[in-house]
Amino acid sequence: MGDDWRVIESVAEYETGWYTGGYDLVEQPDGSTKQYYWAELPPAVVVLAVTDDRVVFVEQYRPTIAETCLECPAGIVEDGESYTTAGARELREETGFDPAGVSLLEDFYCSTGVLRHERGIVFAEGLAPVEQDLDDNEFLSVRSIPVAEALDAAREAPANDATIEALLLAEAEGLL
């Protein structure tokens, strides 16, 4: 089916340092053309960390939606990192917990109608306290919630897609 969708041109209209935005002019299967807009972001990792039957979350203000969100720790996968390596690093930096074990639950594309963005969900356990190392744009607090209450807490507004995905994947794998 993809052979019927010829890209005539691909145009990056702007670059922000965080993401690139643009469009592809595409010939559709019926011969008509249309601009399909996209934003391209680097791969990201989301970490579902569990210790003492509690899920470790961060709370942070998100200027994009003007809300404080309860979220799983997350961040960009740096060049040369796997999702598990990036997940362990992000967990240490954001929460001050170093995991003994990290495993990849799933990796997938997000919001494929508009984003070129891959996300990996990792599960972390065996947490040992270390010092937080927040980036200069990270103003967050660490909060742990009993496993039995974590999904309900994550579903409270404003809910975060990546956090809910992480919880549901871990639950489906029998990790919660």
Image: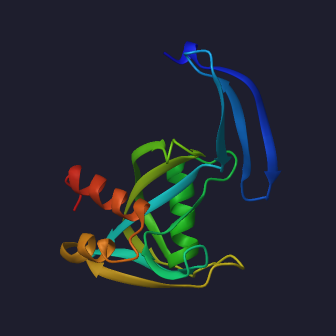
Q: Nearer the viewer, residue 133 or 109?
A: 109
Is residue 88 at all visible to an observer of this figure? yes
Q: Is residue 52 above or below residue 163?
A: below
Is residue 100 at all visible to an observer of this figure? no
x%, y% of residue 122?
A: 42, 54
Q: Is residue 45 above or below residue 112?
A: below
Which residue lies at the image location 55% right of the left edge and 16% below the top edge?
29
Q: Nearer the viewer, residue 112 or 76?
A: 112
Left or right, residue 49 beside residue 27: left
x%, y% of residue 163?
A: 39, 64
x%, y% of residue 102?
A: 42, 55
Total tally of numbered discs in the picture: 0
Residue 55, quarter of picture: bottom left
Residue 10, quarter of picture: top right
Q: Is residue 144 above or below residue 116?
A: below
x%, y% of residue 9?
A: 77, 27
Please, which colouring scheme is shown?
rainbow
Q: Quadrant of the C terminus?
A: bottom left
Left or right, residue 47 beside residue 75: left
Which residue lies at the image location 49% right of the left edge and 51% below the top edge?
84
Q: Is residue 48 above or below residue 33?
A: below
Q: Nearer the viewer, residue 24 or 89?
A: 24
Q: Nearer the viewer, residue 43 or 98?
A: 43
Residue 17, quarter of picture: bottom right
Left or right, residue 75 beside residue 137: left
